[in-house]
Image: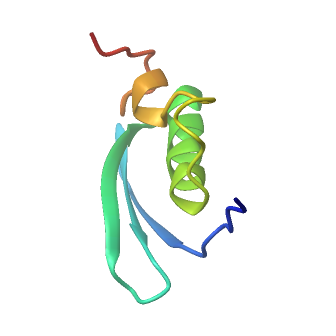
Amino acid sequence: MTTIARTITGGVDTHLDVHVAAALDERGALLGTETFATTPRGYEALLAWLYVLTCPPSPARYPSTRDSIDSRGSPHTHG
């Protein structure tokens, strides 16, 4: 099975301590919003979140962004 990456548009509302990101699909439908810390880990988490929305990895092979880094850029696990 071939997975084709989809096009999304991301927007970021910047603040001193957090950035609030939103992602829209090709039709302008809201895919989601998330809040990220204004730290290097927070920026990494924001980019990872957007990447996952463009081409979701197979759950069997990769942890989801939400399972590995929370919105504050900290490691996070469920369970």
Name the residue located 55 percent from the left edge and 50 percent from the top edge: 52
Asked where in the image residue 3 lies, by quadrant, the reply is bottom right
Asked if residue 29 shows in the view, the reply is yes
Q: Position of residue 53 (x, y in %)?
A: 51, 57
Name the residue located 55 percent from the left edge and 39 percent from the top edge: 43
Name the residue located 40 percent from the left edge and 32 percent from the top edge: 66
Asked where in the image residue 37 lies, by quadrant, the reply is top left
Asked if residue 16 shows in the view, the reply is no
The mark tally for this picture is: 0
Quadrant holding the N terminus: bottom right
- Which residue extends farthest left? 79
- Which residue extends farthest right? 2
Classify residue 57 as left or right of residue 1: left
4 or 25, which lies in front? 4
- Which residue extends farthest bottom? 27
Above or below — where is 48 with respect to 32? above
Q: Position of residue 79 (x, y in %)?
A: 27, 10
- Which residue extends farthest top? 79
Asked where in the image residue 44 lies, by quadrant, the reply is top right
Above or below — where is 13 with respect to 6? above
Above or below — where is 49 with respect to 12? above
Q: Position of residue 29 (x, y in %)?
A: 33, 81
Query: Colour mode?
Result: rainbow
Classify residue 19 as left or right of residue 46: left
